[in-house]
Image (cartoon, rainbow, N blue to C red):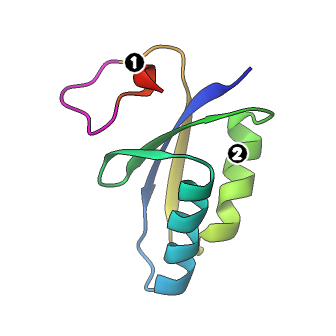
Amino acid sequence: MAVTFFLAFDLSSNNAKKHLELYDELDRLGAQRALKSFWWVKLEDFTTTTFRTYIKQFLDEQDRIFIIKNGGWAAFRPETNPADA
């Protein structure tokens, strides 16, 4: 069964190529942007730890990432709604 993960990141490095690879991979996974640097995606066969480890290949050491597994949520005017997918 697919689980919704929320992904927040700060891309503080100047590696545009690596960041484009991150956005391309998020698109390939079917991720949706809720806010500028806050995305959600439904995935199977991932835990928060394995998803973090997977995404780290698209980040530099100066970048930051925070992943949350859905257990309930609330929002005000998100660009996309995980409940609609």
Q: Which residue is mark 2?
A: 51
In this view, which residue lies farthest toward the left?
A: 77
Dot 2 lies on which element? helix
In this view, which residue lies farthest toward the top?
A: 72
- When asked about the image quadrant of residue 55, the answer is bottom right
Please identify the quadrant where the N terminus is shown: top right
Tell me which residue sits at (73%, 41%) in the image. 49
Magenta-drawn stretch, dominant element (helix, strand or loop): loop
Residue 55, can we see it? yes
Query: From which residue to which does the magenta span run?
Result: 74-80
Q: Which residue is mark 1?
A: 73
Answer few, some or many: residues within 10 Å of disc 2's Cα (few below 14, many 20 plus, some between 14 and 19).
some
Tell me which residue sits at (62%, 50%) in the image. 29
In this view, which residue lies farthest toward the right?
A: 45
* CA gap, disc 1 and disc 2: 19 Å
**Relative to residue 36, is residue 46 drawn left or right?**
right
Q: Position of residue 44 (x, y in %)?
A: 75, 32
Can residue 22 be found in the magenta stretch? no
Q: Position of residue 47 (x, y in %)?
A: 74, 33
